[in-house]
Image (cartoon, helix red, strand yellow):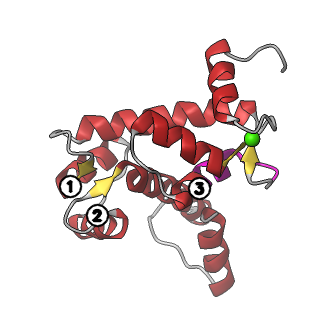
Amino acid sequence: MAGQYDPQIAQWFAAVDTDRSGRITSTELQTALMSSNGRQFSETACRLMIGLFDTAGTGSIDMTGFGQLYGYVNQWMDSFRRYDSNGSGFVDQNELMQAFSTMGYRFSQPFIDFVHTKFGERGQGVPVDGFIMACILIHKLTEGFRKKDASQQGVITINYEDFLSTVLQAWV
Ligand SMILES: [Ca+2]
């Protein structure tokens, strides 16, 4: 709906859309996050974020998608800052456990340790872009799992191609 955008979002959109194409690509998002956050977000994290609202598969998002993404990014960053209790810019296993349980996930310690290793940087913990990637992938894979888990038992039987489709669907 043209003319109904939050003027603040429209202003940010214009600042991020550096080539004035009317759409935001992952590269434009990466540049914007770098300047607002002071940290280089990985290309993969930016592509995953764009992919969340890139319904047409163009590799970019319009202002509506940008507004939605902006809301999500703020929530993830708030959550990250809340659990990064010593302000190091990285979360450790305990902080990850707290963050996920606040989001409603009940994960075991071994799984948290796995996520910490997978999305973390050696010896430092999980940075904000790794945290956002983990949130997006876990959210999408959980949705895929739930669709197959009709009885809500937390266990599914899945054939090979369904498994591949579920995982690849979550990827970019
Ligand atoms: Ca653009």
Residue at (81%, 38%) from the top-left corner? 21
Q: Is residue 9 left or right of residue 57?
A: left
Residue named by callout 1:
92
Q: Is residue 36 magenta?
A: no
Residue named by callout 3:
48
User: Is 154 located above or below residue 50 in the figure?
Assistant: below
Q: Is residue 110 left or right of residue 44?
A: left
The kind of residue tagged 2 is: His
Of the numbered discs 3 and 1, the one sitting upstream in the chain is 3
Residue at (76%, 36%) from the top-left corner? 62
Q: Position of residue 25 (x, y in %)?
A: 69, 47
Q: Are marks 2 and 1 in contact (CB under 8 Å)?
A: yes
Of residues 132 and 109, the one drawn nearer to the viewer in this rendering: 132
Residue at (81%, 13%) from the top-left corner? 3
The kind of residue tagged 1 is: Asp
User: Secondary structure under badge 3?
Assistant: helix
Of the numbered discs 2 and 1, the one sitting upstream in the chain is 1
Q: Residues within 10 Å of mark 3 (few under 14, many from 20)?
A: many
User: Secondary structure under badge 1?
Assistant: loop
Residue named by callout 2:
116
